[in-house]
Image (cartoon, grey):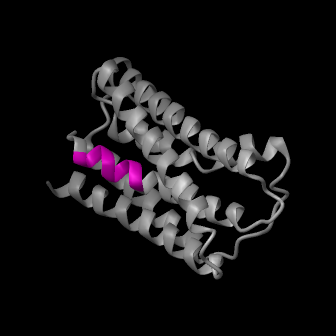
Amino acid sequence: MNFLDVVLIGLALAMDAFGVSLGIGINKEVIRKQKLLYSISFAFFQFIFTFLGGYLGYFFNTYIVNIPEILGGIVIGIVGLLMIIEGTKEKEESVLTKKSMIFILGISVSIDALVIGFTAFNSIKKISLVLNSSIIGIITFIICIMAFFICRYIKGISYISKYADFFGGGALIFFALKMLFF
């Protein structure tokens, strides 16, 4: 897997965090320190779930049975479709100022990273897995910080959040097609 593929996956995975960050950013009760903690949480869980997924996928391939590229492409495509479907649903408000929400939302926006790690990063060496997972975490952090800056200027946030899910889902579907046919 080349660097551009990792960046595209990182951008796709970061779209959930981007949408959630936009939603958090317009809440007047959330202070700057909490926004930074949300960004760190999202990036950390994207990193750790991608790493764990890749490591578990490697373990599964090595000691149980090999997962072919086709199955990985199908799973990534399904995750992309689920992100697009999620983008059509109405988002609910939550209590964003509680410290537990930083942890809970960090995990919830990163579940798809576990699947991506398991399917796309399961056959690479450990050092590459750490590097690729780190790139995904860094991309997520930057995307979240950008979302919080954008919130200063945007009024219709539900509209933007909706399209963030579509972009992320579309990027995953594109990557799944690349895995399946190229």
Q: Residue at x 43, y 46 (%)?
A: 139
Quarter occupied by the N terminus: top left
Q: How many marks overall?
A: 0
Position of residue 149 relative to residue 87, above or below, is above
Residue 153, image x and y in percent? 60, 75
Q: Is residue 7 left or right of residue 169?
A: left
Q: Where is residue 162 drawn, in percent x and y?
A: 56, 75
- In the image, 171 versus 118, the foreground residue is 171
How far across and how far down the image is residue 157, in percent? 64, 76
In this image, 61 relative to 106: left or right? Answer: left
| 137 relative to 89 in the view: left or right | left
Q: Position of residue 135 (x, y in %)?
A: 38, 38
- Position of the C terminus, as image quadrant, is bottom left
**Rendered position, 150 above or below 59:** below
The residue located at (61%, 46%) in the rendering is 39
Q: Quadrant of residue 171?
A: bottom left
Residue located farthest toward the left when viewing the structure as drawn: 182
Side of 174 where 13 appears, left or right:
right
Q: Residue at x 64, y 77 (%)?
A: 158
Residue at point 52%, 58% (across, down): 146
Please tell me whether residue 74 belongs to the stretch shown in magenta.
no
The one of 154 and 132 positioned closer to us in this rendering: 154
Secondary structure character of the magenta stretch overall: helix
Range of residues picked out in magenta: 4-11
Where residue 131 sits, quadrant-wise, is top left
